[in-house]
C-alpha cells in the first residue's frame, strides 16, 4: 500500500500543463473500528493506488498527481479519518475544492452501531483516537457527532455492524468494483424477511406484507417468489396491480432524480414476513421494469432466501 511520502514524490514531478485525465478517486472515511482497513484492502486488490491515513490537504495533491500523464495513476483510493487530528476538519472543504477543480471523488462512509464498535475495540485492546485516556464509548459518541456532516456528504454509507472483514470486502467488490459502466448508478434490490429484522443499509424500504401470502398454501410454501405459481398467487386480484400502478411510476421519477443528483448507489429493500415469497416476486417485477434503463445497473440480492434461478 502506498505511503503519504510516495504521493509527495510523484506529485513533485507532475507536469502542470498536462490536460486533465479521466481518473477515479474514492475517499474512504467513517467511524474508527468500522472496517476502513478492510475497505481499502478491497480496492488495493482491484488494482487501485491506495494510501492509508492521508491528511485531507494531501488529497488535493493526489488530485494534481492525476493530471500528470506520466504518473500512470488512473484509479486511487485513500483513507482519511480522525487519526489525522486537527487536519481532519479540512476534509469537507478539500472535497469541495477537488470538485471545483473538475475531479468528482466518490466518498465511502463506513459506520457501525455503538455496541459493535465497543466490542471491536475490546477485542483489539486499542484506544479510541478521540478518547485516548477515557472511556471508549465517549470517544465513539464524540466521533459520531464530529462525522455527522461528512456522513451527509457521502455518496455511499455502509453499515458494517453485521459484517466480517471478508463480507465487507465482498460487498465493496460487488457494489463498487463490479465492473458496471462508469456513470451508471448501481441499484441493489434487497429482499428480506421482517421476522429476521430489517436491513440497516436500505435507502428505501418497501413493506409488501399486504399482498396475498403463499406461505399458507401447502403447495406453494416450499417455493420462492421466483416460481411462476407463487408469482401468480401473489399478483392475483387487484391489490398487486394497484400497487405496481403507483410504485413503478414513482421509481421512474426517483431513479433519474437520484442519478442526476450524483448518487452512485441506491439500495431498495423489499420485505415480507419471511423474505421468501412476496418480497422476491415484487423485487423481480421491479428488476424487469428497471433493467432496461441506460442510467442504472440493477443487482438483486435475496438476504433470507436462495431461490432457484
Image: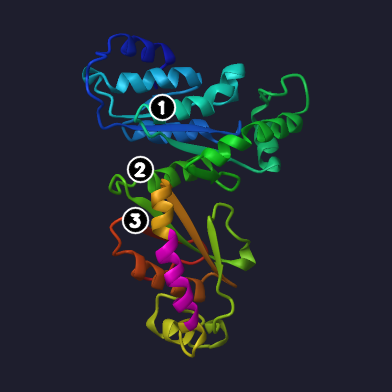
Q: Is residue 111 left or right of residue 43?
A: right
Q: Residue furthest right?
A: 134
Disc nearest the viewer among 1 and 2: 1
**Residue at (54%, 84%) from the top-left corner?**
212
- Majority SS type along the magenta span: helix
The foreground one among 199 and 297 is 297
Start-end of magenta stretch = 242-254
Question: Crowdedness of circle 3 by 10 Å Cα count: few (<14), some, many (20+)?
Answer: many
- Image coords of residue 134 (percent x, y): 78, 23
Residue located beneath label 1 in the image? 98
- Image coords of residue 138 (percent x, y): 76, 30
Asked if the residue under mark 2 is in contact with the one under mark 1, i.e. CB atoms within 8 Å, the reply is no
Question: Crowdedness of circle 2 by 10 Å Cα count: few (<14), some, many (20+)?
Answer: few
- Image coords of residue 256 (percent x, y): 38, 57
Q: Above or below — where is 104 with respect to 171? A: above
Q: Above or below — where is 123 with respect to 244? A: above
Element marked by disc 1? helix
Question: Is tag 3's residue or tag 2's residue first in the polypeptide sequence?
Answer: 2
Quadrant where the C terminus is found in the figure: bottom left
Query: Could you say which disc has been placed on residue 296 in the image?
Result: 3
Amino acid at each position: 500500500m502506498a505511503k503519504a511520502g510516495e504521493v509527495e514524490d510523484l506529485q513533485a514531478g507532475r507536469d502542470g500543463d498536462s490536460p486533465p485525465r479521466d481518473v477515479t478517486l474514492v475517499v474512504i472515511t467513517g467511524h474508527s473500528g468500522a472496517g476502513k482497513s478492510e475497505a481499502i484492502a478491497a480496492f488495493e486488490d482491484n488494482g487501485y493506488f491506495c494510501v492509508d491515513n492521508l491528511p485531507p490537504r494531501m488529497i488535493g495533491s493526489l488530485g494534481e498527481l492525476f493530471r500528470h500523464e506520466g504518473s500512470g495513476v488512473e484509479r486511487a483510493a485513500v483513507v482519511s479519518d480522525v487519526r489525522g487530528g486537527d487536519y481532519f476538519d479540512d476534509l469537507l472543504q478539500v472535497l469541495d475544492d477537488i470538485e471545483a477543480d473538475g475531479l468528482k471523488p466518490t466518498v465511502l462512509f463506513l459506520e457501525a452501531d455503538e455496541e459493535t464498535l465497543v466490542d471491536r475495540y475490546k477485542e483489539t485492546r486499542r484506544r479510541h483516537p478521540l478518547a485516548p485516556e477515557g472511556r471508549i464509548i465517549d470517544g465513539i459518541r464524540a466521533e459520531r457527532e464530529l462525522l455527522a456532516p461528512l456522513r451527509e456528504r457521502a455518496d455511499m454509507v455502509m453499515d458494517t455492524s453485521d459484517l466480517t472483514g471478508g463480507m465487507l470486502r465482498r460487498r465493496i467488490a460487488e457494489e463498487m468494483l463490479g465492473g458496471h459502466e462508469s456513470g451508471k448508478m448501481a441499484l441493489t434490490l434487497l429482499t428480506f424477511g421482517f421476522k429476521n429484522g430489517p436491513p440497516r443499509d436500505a435507502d428505501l424500504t418497501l413493506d409488501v406484507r399486504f399482498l396475498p401470502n403463499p406461505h399458507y398454501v401447502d403447495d406453494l410454501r416450499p417455493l420462492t417468489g421466483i416460481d411462476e405459481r407463487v408469482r401468480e398467487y401473489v399478483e392475483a386480484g387487484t391489490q398487486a396491480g394497484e400497487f405496481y400502478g403507483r410504485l413503478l411510476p414513482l421509481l421512474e421519477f426517483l431513479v433519474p432524480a437520484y442519478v442526476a443528483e450524483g448518487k452512485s448507489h441506491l439500495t431498495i429493500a423489499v420485505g415480507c414476513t419471511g423474505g421468501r415469497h412476496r418480497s422476491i416476486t415484487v423485487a423481480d417485477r421491479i428488476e424487469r421494469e428497471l433493467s432496461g434503463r441506460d442510467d442504472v445497473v440493477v443487482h438483486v440480492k435475496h438476504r433470507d432466501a436462495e431461490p432457484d434461478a
